[in-house]
Amino acid sequence: MKFIMSYSCGKDSTLALHKMIEQGHEPVGLIVMVNETAERSYFHGADYNMLNQYSEVLDIPMILCRAKEETYHTAFEEGLLKAKSIGAEAACFGDIDIEQNRRWEEERCDVAGLIPYFPLWQRGREKNVQELIELGYKCLIKSINMTVLPKSILGKYIDEDSISVMKCANIDICGENGEYHTLVVDGPIFKKTLSFYIGGIIELGDYAVVDIR
């Protein structure tokens, strides 16, 4: 089956993409939502240079959908329609168990005439994180909620040490409630390691973000 991957550059969408490829499905593209104001991807904050690199190192074409909050859903639907025009039969998502998110994505797929697919649905949250580590994926912690996590783990990989910090903080290890976000920079489906550098830390209210370019 040919599919478009809703890709955030983070750990969950990367694991979902890994599983689809492992099952023999063919990705025709990566759909990425870009914040028009920030000129970076929504939620995970990858800039255009980094997004171009993701397309290269994964060897998958990318569909960039620039949007503001009020145009997000229509821009996403336009991206799905473009994916369908290049052969996509389904759209894949990395959601695990949040019903509201799944319903929103299913509605967008209905508009575009694509089958919604959720390879991680109802899998254990911590199980997903442990599987990423075991598979060899390198997941950089890009942002954190400072009310629950220390800034010291920013720019670190998800590994047993950072998981220990998360467990001590008593948070969801998968970060499904927005406790942290990641950028995946290497792993089995990468043709080579993403080239990047880590800059300074920016605080935005309760959140801290490390500048990864």
Image (spheres, rainbow, N blue to C red):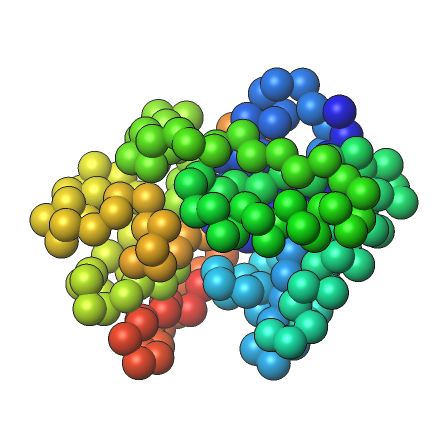
Looking at the image, is 63 positioned above or below residue 139?
Answer: below
Q: Residue at horizontal 79%, vertical 34%?
A: 89
Residue 94 image point, x, y percent: 52, 41
| Residue at the extreme right of the image, as rendered | 85
Residue 177 image point, x, y percent: 34, 55
The answer to whether one can see residue 124 in this image is yes
Residue 100 image point, x, y percent: 49, 52
Quarter of the image with the N terminus is top right
Residue 168 image point, x, y percent: 10, 49
Q: Residue at horizontal 47%, vertical 33%?
A: 121
Looking at the image, is 206 positioned above or below residue 135?
Answer: below
Q: Residue at horizontal 72%, vertical 46%?
A: 109
Task: Report the number of discs.
Answer: 0
Q: Quadrant of residue 136?
A: top left
Looking at the image, is 19 positioned above or below residue 91?
Answer: above
Residue placed most toward the observer, 178 or 180: 178
The answer to whether one can see residue 49 in this image is no
Q: Quadrant of residue 69?
A: bottom right
| Residue at the extreme left of the image, as rendered | 168
